[in-house]
Image (cartoon, rainbow, N blue to C red):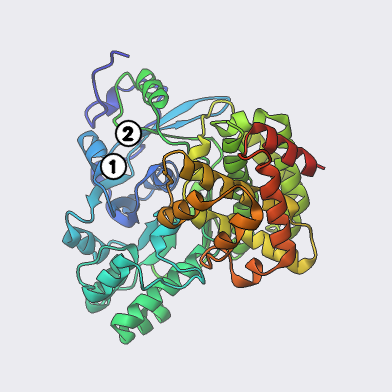
């Protein structure tokens, strides 16, 4: 496409009428929210809600910081931090978001990040750094052996990790006589707020017990549940957005039309009128988060590994395969739904049906490879916990074990195909993968010994190891897993 102009503050007023844009004066807002990790999910989700908030309350714009690279800042700064969200469903719409006031790159300017965290107008810190960004060990405690945590414990005034920044920011606020900010984890962890509070508390205790006591008494880390399917940005999206705007956006983002944000009603300081922009504020977040993590994300990970082995590239392609989609539906209805206490008023059956419909959304190219990332971090949260609950309650687990077995084949395939895996445990996993022979008796024990993934009680449970071995061997009949073996294994369990 030959559009050469780029989105900018000046062009905002000249965009086509069909493109929605900030309904407030961007020069009149202040940053009440600090955000860590302005990736695509943040930009389609929290920033979108905040853009709505700013229409009536100018105090809640966002200052964001990337903890690693400058890519987002470099792309958006020339556009005055404006960017486009494409909402892809039967009806496709475009909206330019103005909620990001400033984007910092933490390694470039630690002082600037700390100054914003300690600013009196900052009341909330939101976080999307993915599961691994919390530096938690297998038991959910802060992993003090991690290099960045060790570094921050040694030099806490110039942090590099999320936890280090939060604790130093809180220390500065306490010294200045300010209230702590509310810390809002928006990542897909079970009880994300509880885990964040524990990690922050553990870190603070190591460096300053008095500070830890203050944070423990005054600080708040509400649990949250966040939801909106957000495929990575690709050239098709860039072109689609350019055609709609009449100018190019250096980094547009996309999502489905469904969007949900549930926040626990527990705040340390001032908060915006969340409810006014469609956020659910409730005491029942654990019910929402398990329902979503187990059903949506659990099914997503099942599709990612089984679908990849079967040679599909996207979620909607995998869902168009009758055997695979029948298996996923049974997995949800027979083995996941019985493990869930639904939030008050939610019909679980209808929720599961709506998820299957969202997975089939034909306007979205949601790459299975994107979901397959970080399996070692995601599987315990999305699937292994459900297996443990089902075992305890005497419910079946065969279907739940199949995606876990598929992940093992996925690791093996990646180890054999040149050795790449997007996973913080890639080194260990690929090493194991290279030694796998495709036979459960030989291959499984070394994986089951990874206690950060498989808690000892699970790894030693005969029902679990037998079902996992059966799934693994069925997927590997003939040497390697392929569409034929995936179909046979799924068909056998799609009842
Ligand atoms: C997906 C999630 O990439 C993944 O692992 O399962 O990002 C999923 O799309 C979101 O949680 C939906 O809210």
Q: Nearer the viewer, residue 365 or 394?
A: 394
Q: Residue at the location (68% across, 55% down)? A: 468
Q: Nearer the viewer, residue 285 or 421?
A: 421
Q: Quadrant of the N terminus?
A: top left
Which residue bears the numbered disc 1?
Answer: 72
Position of residue 435 measured from the top left corner of the image (x, y, whole percent): 51, 52
**Identity of the residue furthest to the top in this view:** 2
Residue 64, percent across and down? 29, 51
Residue at image point 42% right, 53% down: 426
Q: Residue at x 39, y 78 (%)?
A: 202
* Some atom of ligand 1 lies within 8 Å of the CB belonging to the residue at label 1: no
On screen, residue 311 above or below 203: above
Total marks drawn? 2
**Which image quarter holds the C terminus?**
top right
In the displayed structure, would residue 118 be above or below residue 327? below
**Does the numbered disc 2 mark a residue whose Cβ is under 8 Å from ligand 1?**
no
- Residue 58 circle label: none
Question: Residue at image x 31%, y 28%?
Answer: 249
| Residue 379 shows up from this direction | yes
**On the rendered structure, is 57 left or right of 478?**
left
The quadrant where residue 4 appears? top left
Residue 251, numbered label: 2
Measured in 3D between alpha carbons, the distance from the residue under mark 1 to the one under mark 2, in whole angstroms, is 8 Å
> Is residue 290 visible to us here?
no
Q: Secondary structure at mark 1?
A: helix
Residues at marks 1 and 2 touching, judged by CB atoms closer than 8 Å: yes
Above or below — where is 268 with respect to 125?
A: below
Secondary structure category for the residue under label 2: loop
């Amino acid at each position: 496409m030959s559009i050469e102009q780029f989105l900018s503050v000046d062009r905002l007023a000249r965009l086509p009428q069909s493109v929605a844009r900030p309904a407030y004066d961007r020069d009149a807002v202040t940053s009440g929210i600090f955000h860590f990790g302005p990736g695509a999910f943040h930009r389609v989700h929290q920033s979108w809600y905040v853009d709505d908030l700013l229409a009536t309350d100018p105090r809640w714009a966002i200052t964001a910081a990337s903890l690693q690279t400058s890519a987002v800042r470099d792309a958006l700064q020339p556009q005055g931090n404006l960017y486009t969200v494409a909402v892809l469903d039967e009806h496709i719409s475009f909206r330019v978001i103005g909620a990001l006031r400033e984007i910092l790159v933490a390694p470039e300017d630690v002082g600037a990040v700390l100054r914003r965290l300690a600013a009196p107008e900052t009341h909330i810190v939101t976080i999307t750094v993915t599961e691994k960004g919390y530096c938690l060990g297998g038991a959910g405690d802060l992993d003090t052996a991690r290099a960045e945590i060790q570094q921050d414990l040694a030099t806490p005034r110039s942090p590099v990790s999320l936890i280090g920044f939060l604790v130093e920011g809180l220390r500065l606020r306490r010294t200045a006589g300010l209230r702590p900010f509310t810390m809002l984890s928006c990542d897909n962890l079970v009880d994300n707020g509880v885990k964040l509070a524990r990690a922050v508390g553990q870190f603070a205790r190591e460096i300053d017990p008095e500070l830890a006591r203050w944070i423990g008494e005054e600080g708040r880390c509400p649990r949250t549940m966040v939801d909106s399917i957000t495929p990575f940005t690709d050239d098709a999206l860039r072109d689609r957005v350019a055609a709609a705007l009449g100018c190019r956006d250096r980094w547009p983002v996309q999502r489905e039309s469904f969007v949900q944000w549930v926040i626990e009603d527990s705040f340390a300081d001032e908060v915006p009128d969340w409810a006014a922009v469609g956020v659910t504020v409730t005491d029942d977040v654990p019910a929402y988060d398990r329902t979503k993590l187990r059903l949506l994300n659990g099914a997503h990970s099942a599709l990612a590994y089984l679908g990849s082995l079967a040679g599909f590239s996207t979620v909607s392609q995998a869902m168009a395969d009758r055997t695979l989609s029948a298996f996923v539906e049974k997995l949800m209805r027979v083995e996941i739904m019985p493990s869930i206490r639904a939030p008050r008023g939610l019909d679980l059956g209808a929720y599961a049906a709506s998820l299957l419909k969202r997975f089939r959304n034909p306007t979205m190219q949601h790459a299975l490879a994107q979901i397959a990332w970080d399996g070692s971090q995601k599987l315990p949260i999305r699937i292994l916990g459900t297996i443990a609950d089902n075992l305890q309650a005497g419910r079946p687990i065969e279907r739940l074990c199949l995606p876990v077995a598929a992940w093992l084949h996925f690791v093996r395939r990646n180890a054999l195909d040149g050795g790449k895996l997007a996973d913080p445990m890639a080194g260990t996993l690929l090493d194991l993968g290279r030694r796998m022979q495709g036979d459960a008796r030989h291959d499984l024990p070394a994986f089951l010994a990874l206690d950060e993934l498989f808690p000892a009680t699970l790894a030693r449970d005969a029902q679990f190891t037998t079902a996992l071995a059966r799934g693994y061997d069925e997927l590997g009949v003939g040497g390697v897993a392929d569409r034929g073996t995936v179909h046979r294994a799924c068909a056998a369990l799609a009842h």
